[in-house]
Amino acid sequence: MATAFKDDHTGAHTPVHSDAVVVRFAGDSGDGMQLTGGQFTLSSALAGNDFATFPDFPAEIRAPQGTLFGVSAFQINFGSQAIDTAGDQPDVLVAMNPAALKTNVGSLREGGLIIADTGEFTPRNLDKAKYTTNPFEDGSLAKWQVLAFDISALTMESVKPYGLGNKEALRCKNMWTLGLALWMFDRDRQPIIDWLNAKFAKNQVLADANIAALNAGHAYGETAELSGPLKQYHVDAAPAPAGVYRTVTGAESISYGLVAGAQLAGLKMFFGGYPITPASAILHHLSRLKEYGITTFQAEDEIAAICSAIGASYAGQLGVTSSSGPGIALKGEAMGLAIMTELPLVIVNSQRGGPSTGLPTKTEQSDLYQAVYGRNGDAPMPVIAARSPVDAFDCAVEAVRIAVEYMTPVMLLTDGYIANAAEPWKVPDLESYKPFPVEFLESVPEGGFKPYARDHKLKRPWVKPGTPGLLHRIGGIEKEVDTGHINYAPANHQAMTDIRSAKVNGVADSIPDQIVEQGATGAKVAVVGWGSTYGPIAQAVRRKRAEGVDVAHVHIRHIWPMPKNLGELLKSFDHIIVPEMNTGQLKTVLRDQFLVDAKPVNKVSGQPFTIAEIEAAIESALS
Amino acid sequence: MNDMTPVKATSPKDWETDQEVRWCPGCGDYAILKAVQRTMPELGSTPENTVFISGIGCSSRFPYYMETYGFHTIHGRAPAVATGVKLANPDLDVWIITGDGDALSIGGNHTMHLLRRNLDCQIMLFNNEIYGLTKGQYSPTSRVGTTSPSTPYGSVDRPATPCAFALGSGARFVARGFDVSKNLPEVLKAAHAHRGAAFIEIFQNCIVYNKDVFEDFAAPKGAEDHQLWLRHGEPMLFAKGTKGIALDVDALTLKVVDVVEDDWKSAGVIVHDVTNRSVAHMLVEMRFGEFPMALGVLYDDPRPTFNDAVIAQNVSASAGKTADLGKLLAKGQTWTVEDGHPEV
């Protein structure tokens, strides 16, 4: 982790070995920092490192240049051992302008390295970043190592032969910087060169200029090494099970998981979506996979997106919709319709900071109440939550399974962090997933056809329009038991409400018991988490246990209904703390369901928990 | 509509459910239901391949009474649900049943986009100029000055014109009828024959909250003078052929002209061409009173449907590709760990 990046220099020209390093690239939102981070991530993957990333960008697409709110950053933690988070504190900060330095330097580890482009530290840019004096001259950076030089000029020089205009030439700055970073961490340039050639296949001059900048940055590292704080580091490959690996973001793995789920169910998929940050990437990915029997529909609004998915489910496909908090709120009434008509549906919620428009590009876990309780009437619905980009694949498969096996809408919770972050993924063996083929009712069963007759799981039959002999009508009005006719009778509404609730509760029969990730049942403290807090909790518990602290980590995937053994398990611990990026939503559900003294640990800054914050919470629970 | 050929002939009875009809006695909805049930056997669809999809309101109870597949959805959202149904199974014959509040107020956005996209379906908008099911509030089509529980001093906002809204949204088929009209089946048949979104406004008498609001043109007495039934290729004549609609070339508007001794040609009466979009824009805006009420098929000029385009793209984008997810996941920039270590 952050502490592993030490200055144990063993001699010039020999890379220093490190266990793990945290690097943050920060620049103006037009500087291409996300691209730089993405390519650096790829090079880490190809070097066999384990890693976690944290893209942190503004909601504004092109904020005014040089402003504090226009800073875009990409952090990566890579190492030769298991990496669960993007790292608490960067060891290296690459700052492309004064605003990037100002907004990011505070989180840099003491003694960490600042690499900055002095070409951008002009009076005007310093002013925009609200610096009254030049930080390189006023001593304010004394606790860090500083490597400040004119990257802009060096980039211009390196691309001179290609005759680009000033603006275009400066755009190659990010590749120059990436070249330097590749040198610093002893990485192969070829995959990035291949990528640049492919990216600029239609403009060889741009490809060549970017490659030249990349090479120049790399060469600069080699020549500058002898003088100053710049050193070369080597991070060994992390041990991992044999197999084929790739990097995956949460948005990608959810998309692939939905495809796998539809294949396991034997269904075509219909995806109704409406653009919203940070959920749109799922719509983008699925739109390119038409050969998998997927129809994607960009609807006129969030309501049409879910309603079209319900219509497709009614017609016999797997209906899927996706959004983020504000859009999920708009879909609420239609979720009730899917619950009432008992049609399968998967609703993906990529949570972001709220309420209202809130923090569109920042992460939060504040939609748990909305997922579990946020509809009119008694409207129970299964809810599951992904803990990481890789885990999101299995969660998507699981959401599809529950939806079709129980004829119910299911909400899959993820968040902005999971959606955008990347991690290495051992490509799954799809043969190892058990199929759950859907059987449509196609003829009148013995005893006659009843649209709301139920099997042992309380599931009603799925009948596709177009099937002769099974004509029937469904809708949002209360149904009569079995027949599905309109019925407002008091006893009937009681019975149907009870059935809907029992059906969803019954999903618990099909999910695994809650396991303890680390530590033992009955530990002094249990840290109970859900969703993307997995990484910092896992690391914090690992460290505390290494110190001999009796602490356990429980991470809940099935938010509703919960695993059957969860209550008993929670009651075995002396103390329960629940870290959440909200004001205590899972904590409330746990207290309500099990009457346990779950204590909240909350953070709603739009940033993930740091490991240190969770460690502190464990200590305070024990004191 | 679709290209299904009937397996066997049906009678109107085959399209009736065993459900008790729950509209107020005397409601115009009964007549529309009968007209639809009478028309269905002539359309070439089968009950199992037919889906009626509705929103919320009095009209939206309609699917319960049709022996077909049916989906009574939520307020305003029938077009969105219908879009999913039709894209998932384009062989289905999809009918949307909606009202003035459902289609133009809460669901106005979906109506607009369904028409713009041109989903192949029929949209029957029952316009009674009032919210019936919520007990009589004024609606987006109520005339200025409508007194209702929510407008005790009369409504002050201007009403929407459903057919103008439809045409403005890009509809390629726009028709009008009214509940008890004997011509309604003919309009329904034309709508069904149109491949694409077919929009039909049906004036419907709410006998409880807005009784006889269409009586000025729908009443049998004087109907000849107040109704202009449009038929493709025929002159726009009414009042037993003594009056017609002509183009005021100077003002670029329509005008009523007298026709003497059947000589409509010299009176300049327009021959109705259902594919003339410019004239359609004028017909939907014709104000009753100064003009007769334009009824029948106002506009009918098909163009490619949304569902055909979506499916064609699904097919072309899939051509030559296999749906091998395992291969897809292992494609691109991957790396292989050879002699694996146990996971730490």
Image (cartoon, coloured by chain):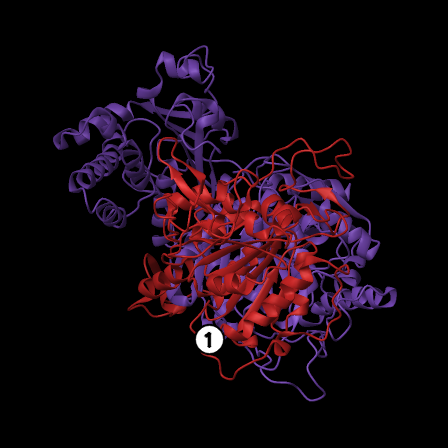
Residue B191 visible in image: yes
Task: Report the side of A498 relative to B158 (left or right).
Answer: right
In x, y percent, where is residue A241? Answer: 44, 65
State the residue in front, A88 or A198.
Answer: A198
Residue nearer the viewer, B207 or A489: B207
Q: Can you give x and y, in whole percent of width and height, for residue B20 in the image?
A: 76, 70
Q: Is residue B200 above or below residue A472?
A: above
Rendering quarter of residue B300: bottom left
Give the colour chain B carries in the figure.
Answer: red
Horizontal relation, residue B218 to residue B90: left or right: right
Q: Residue furthest bottom?
A: A446
- Residue B8, above or below A582: below
Chain ID of residue with mark 1: A
- The quarter holding residue B157 reads top right
- The outermost residue toward the front is B261
Residue A511 in sight: no
The amino acid sitting under disc 1 is Glu
Where residue A296 sits in the image (x, y, percent)?
45, 57
Q: Which residue is mark 1?
A: A431
Q: Give A444 or A619, whichever is nearer the viewer.
A: A444
The C terminus of chain A lies in quadrant: top right
- What SS does tag 1 mark? helix
Residue B300 to residue B250: above or below: below
Disc 1 residue crowd, few under 14, some 14–19, many 20+, Cα 10 Å: few
Q: Colour of chain A?
A: purple
Q: Would residue A392 appear left or right of B13 to someone viewing this image?
A: left
Residue displayed at 50% across by 70% down = B92
